[in-house]
Image (spheres, rainbow, N blue to C red):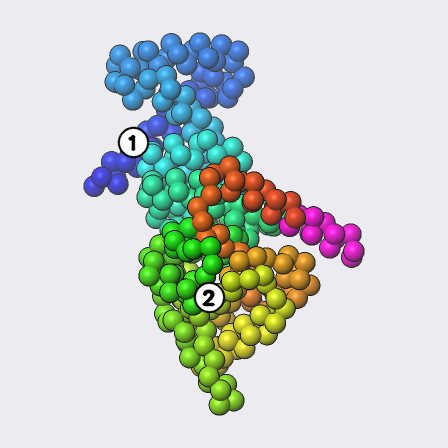
């Protein structure tokens, strides 16, 4: 019942904002816009109460401007409350705003989760953010229209694992144990849809025992996700090891109707050029860094900015070499 009331309020705000934009502000072309909004707010407050004070009325108008397609926004307000939309309005980049709105809708984030995702710069940490703009739009459209989620929407780099409480020096075993101890938080960082399957998954190959650190299943992707933990820099040999794990899982664990398994190698440090040269995407393998301490937002932004610049430079070099 509360969700119905909430969607009704949001729909009301959108319709009011749309009418003000079209009939009074002439879609932003009216020179007297600021004055008329203030006057209109005073009139609406007298008749309908404080929800139409000037600050909120401007939000309502902005809401209708940014989410202008009626069919798309109607789908969103069935799941998202007005409080969700208030968090989305300050997101300046249209693609980022659409990403957070669609992921919030599909994964049923509450308001606090949405705030955390925006503050931790989830979009910038997804593989999707490194793609060309047209490809980003295409994948978000598939998510919105067909509820299809790609690995680029699911996997991110880096993963922020400050909640593990690791000391300056730790082993891969320490990292694995800490993750299992804080499994719920780790899954939240991975994203909605992950289900824990096994720790130290045993695989017998040519009579020898091999052990995969962590095995998950992702419901939307409909595939097993093999996670290997490394405390140092990414090395070329990790590819062959993960490929063996994935082929074994494909042979013995994949059930009918599931996609091929995908691997995630979590390293303390990346090695972008080596990862690119090894063409890991073709082998269904992702490589990502992890951060074991909480960073102030400005430092996280700085690190991500440096990473994005390096990635774009690598992509430009690849294009020039072709």
Q: Percent from the top left, x then y, of residue 73?
A: 41, 38
Mainly helix, strand or loop, the magenta region? helix
Quadrant of residue 202 in the image?
A: bottom left
Q: Residue at x 38, y 53 (%)?
A: 165
Which residue shows up at 44% across the image and 70% down it? 213
Q: Quadrant of residue 224?
A: bottom left
Task: For mark 1, give the secondary structure.
Answer: helix
Q: Quadrant of residue 13?
A: top left
Which of 77/155 is in front?
155
Residue toward you, 293 or 186: 293
Name the residue tied to disc 1: 9
Residue at image mark 2: 172
From mark 2 to mark 1, how far is it between C-alphas?
A: 50 Å
Q: Residue furthest left?
A: 1
Q: Residues within 10 Å of mark 1 (few under 14, many from 20)?
A: some
Q: Is residue 246 left or right of residue 45?
A: right
Q: Which residue range is magenta in the image?
A: 311-322
């Amino acid at each position: 019942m509360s969700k119905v009331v909430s969607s009704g309020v949001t729909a009301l705000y959108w319709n009011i904002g749309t009418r003000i934009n079209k009939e009074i502000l002439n879609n932003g072309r009216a020179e007297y816009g600021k004055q008329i909004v203030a006057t209109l707010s005073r009139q609406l407050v007298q008749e309908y109460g404080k929800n139409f004070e000037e600050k909120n009325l401007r939000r309502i108008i902005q809401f209708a401007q940014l989410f202008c397609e009626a069919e798309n926004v109607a789908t969103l307000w069935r799941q998202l409350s007005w409080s969700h939309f208030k968090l989305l309005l300050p997101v300046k980049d249209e693609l980022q705003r659409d990403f957070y709105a669609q992921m919030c809708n599909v994964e049923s984030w509450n308001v606090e989760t949405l705030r955390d995702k925006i503050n931790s710069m989830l979009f910038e940490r997804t593989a999707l953010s490194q793609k060309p703009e047209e490809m980003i739009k295409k994948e978000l459209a598939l998510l919105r229209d067909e509820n299809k989620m790609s690995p680029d929407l699911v996997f991110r780099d880096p993963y922020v694992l400050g909640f593990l409480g690791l000391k300056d020096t730790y082993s891969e075993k320490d990292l694995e144990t800490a993750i299992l101890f804080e499994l719920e938080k780790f899954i939240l960082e991975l994203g909605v849809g992950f289900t824990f399957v096994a720790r130290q998954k045993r695989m017998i190959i040519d009579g020898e025992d091999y052990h995969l650190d962590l095995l998950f299943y992702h419901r939307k992707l409909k595939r097993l996700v093999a996670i290997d933990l490394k405390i140092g820099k990414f090395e070329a040999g990790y590819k062959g090891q993960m490929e063996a794990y994935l082929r074994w899982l494909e042979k013995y664990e994949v059930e009918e109707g599931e996609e091929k398994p995908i691997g995630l190698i979590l390293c303390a440090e990346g090695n972008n050029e080596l990862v690119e040269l090894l063409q890991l995407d073709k082998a269904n393998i992702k490589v990502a860094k992890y951060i074991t301490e909480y960073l102030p937002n400005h430092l996280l932004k700085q690190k991500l900015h440096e990473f994005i610049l390096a990635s774009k430079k690598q992509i430009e070099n690849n294009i020039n070499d072709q």
